[in-house]
């Protein structure tokens, strides 16, 4: 798959996997902020129609057709059609959303809903700067579709609204909830008598034992160093806490030289230095590395919670993959997890039917819709409680348990979404670090230089948290 919008893109693109490279430099609009010009169709607002949808207004929905397919989106369209039978719905399931949508945005003729996900997706920060997106606060405050007494906002997992908020305006609503951790085969560990480590010291000790058995302790998706970055940055956040995360996101001076980050980088340099990373991992794509892991050639692999769905067709029976949290603690407890929503849905500001677009999202983000998605894709949706009552696979069950154990200690870095050049600098430097070509000091210096360069660039819109 593709690592998200943070990767979901890449990771979820199952089959298309490659790191998500934001499309669009600044060419998203030809002249001035777009809008539907106040001519957008509207109907009378009521308890049953809180967003004022015009019943016969056409609706165009564009969905990224990656690892999750688009059946879940089509199911939500069917519900929309039942409520508004006179509306004509145009559905498009695409692999290259950015490539197809860029000219539509430039021409001022975008669809009513866009699932902006996948490799080559549109750069959301650029869309925000060009005022191409609708503020979704009216949707968030509308009654939830199938949970009486709650607003849409009330039904979402922690952090989902913040993940789609830029400069105080929520312009994206992410449908899936990704948790990053370390994956292993529960069956393999039981066979060999291995116990998942509760600290990094225990991890190093266990790696020595694993290597003696002839199994490589770790592998990673070497062509996309972002994967190995995730446990490193998770460890740093657990050591240094949310102040460390905010300093990174806010492009603070010396942010990348904070002790928590250098300690985490040192830990991963040690992992590589001791030979605990499978030889040749650097040359492997995500599918190749994950296949090797499923063949028991390595004990651990870092990945987001889409892994089980992505590996579904190649995972041997009885493998029982589960996700463990990164074994580290400090300012945050050991149960803390890096988690964020992804699969980003937008309503363009120049949409012809913005009320219909938001109503479609109200249906899509209903508990029933999210539960069906979870059951079909072994993936945690962004709607709280959507997996309640479901019989979960080993992987999804472990992800759900990790989220519940973390409680309010789920955190996320925002710099990847805000500043794509910094994300690339971090990925490149970490790829060099874990292949022993640069030192920890070089790693932090290189990334800090990229961060400082962005901070000084007056042409880049800055965000803070």
Image (cartoon, grey):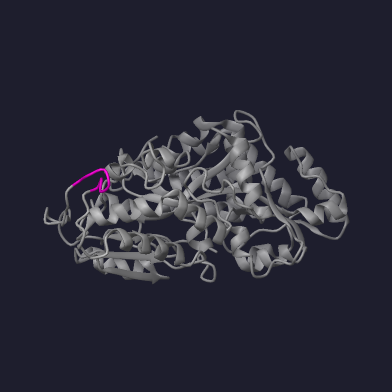
Percent x, y for residue 61? 32, 64
Percent x, y for residue 91? 34, 69
Q: Which residue is located at x 50 percent, y 41 percent?
A: 412
Camera-nearest residue between 293 and 401: 401
Camera-nearest residue between 369 and 82: 82
Asked which quadrant contains residue 290, the reply is: bottom right
Asked if residue 375 can be seen in this view, the reply is yes
Residue 48 lies in the magenta stretch: yes
Q: Residue furthest top?
A: 331
Residue 34 lies in the magenta stretch: no
Q: Disc count in the image?
A: 0
Q: Which residue is located at x 72 percent, y 52 percent?
A: 272
In the rendered image, the quadrant that contains the C terminus is top left
- Relative to 256, say whether 37 is above or below: below
Asked if residue 419 can be seen in this view, the reply is no
Camera-nearest residue between 93 and 272: 93
- Relative to 14, say whether 174 is above or below: above
In the rendered image, the quadrant that contains the N terminus is bottom right
Q: Which residue is located at x 86 percent, y 50 percent?
A: 209
User: What secondary structure characterizes most of the magenta part?
Assistant: loop
Asked which quadrant contains residue 349, the reply is: bottom left
- Relative to 407, say whether 323 is above or below: below
Q: Which residue is located at x 29 percent, y 42 percent?
A: 137
Q: Please give the range of residues in magenta.
A: 45-51
12 left or right of 106? right
Percent x, y for residue 354? 23, 55
Camera-nearest residue between 10 and 126: 10
């Amino acid at each position: 798959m593709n690592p998200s919008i943070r990767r979901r893109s890449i990771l979820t693109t199952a089959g298309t996997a490659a790191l998500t490279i934001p499309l669009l430099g600044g060419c998203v609009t030809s002249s001035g902020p777009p809008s539907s010009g106040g001519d957008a169709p509207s109907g009378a607002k009521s308890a049953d129609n809180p967003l004022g949808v015009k019943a016969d207004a056409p609706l165009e929905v564009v969905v990224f057709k990656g690892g999750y397919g688009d059946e879940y989106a089509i199911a939500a369209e069917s519900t929309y059609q039942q409520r508004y039978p006179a509306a004509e719905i145009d559905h498009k399931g695409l692999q290259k959303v950015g490539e197809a949508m860029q000219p539509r945005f430039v021409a001022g003729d975008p669809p009513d809903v866009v699932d902006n996900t996948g490799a080559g997706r549109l750069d959301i920060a650029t869309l925000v700067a060009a005022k191409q997106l609708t503020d979704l606060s009216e949707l968030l405050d509308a009654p939830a579709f199938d949970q009486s007494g709650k607003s849409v906002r009330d039904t979402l997992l922690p952090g989902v609204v913040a993940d789609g908020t830029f400069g105080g305006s929520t312009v994206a609503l992410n449908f899936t909830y990704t948790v990053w951790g370390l994956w292993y085969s529960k069956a393999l560990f039981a066979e060999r008598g291995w116990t998942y480590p509760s600290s990094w010291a225990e991890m190093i000790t266990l790696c020595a034992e694993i290597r003696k058995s002839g199994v490589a302790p770790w592998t990673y998706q070497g062509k996309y160093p972002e994967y190995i970055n995730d446990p490193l940055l998770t460890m740093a956040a657990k050591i240094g806490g949310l102040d460390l995360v905010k300093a990174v996101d806010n492009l603070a001076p010396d942010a990348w030289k904070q002790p928590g980050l250098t300690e985490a980088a040192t830990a991963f340099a040690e992992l590589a230095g001791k030979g605990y990373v499978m030889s040749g991992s650097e040359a492997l794509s995500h599918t190749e590395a994950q296949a090797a892991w499923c063949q028991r050639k390595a004990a651990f692999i870092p990945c987001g919670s889409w892994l089980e769905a992505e590996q579904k067709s190649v995972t041997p029976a009885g493998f029982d993959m589960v996700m463990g949290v990164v074994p580290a603690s400090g300012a945050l407890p050991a149960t803390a997890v890096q988690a964020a929503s992804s699969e980003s849905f937008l309503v363009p500001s120049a949409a012809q039917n913005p009320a219909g677009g938001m109503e479609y999202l109200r249906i899509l983000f209903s508990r029933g819709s999210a539960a069906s998605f979870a059951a079909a894709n072994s993936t945690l949706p962004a709607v709280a409680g959507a997996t309640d009552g479901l019989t979960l696979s080993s992987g999804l069950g472990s992800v759900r348990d990790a989220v519940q154990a973390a409680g309010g200690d789920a955190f996320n870095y925002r710099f990847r979404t805000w500043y794509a050049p910094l994300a690339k600098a971090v990925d490149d430097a970490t790829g060099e670090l874990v292949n022993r070509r640069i030192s920890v000091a070089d790693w932090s210096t290189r990334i800090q230089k990229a961060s400082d360069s962005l901070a000084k660039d007056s042409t880049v819109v800055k965000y803070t948290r």
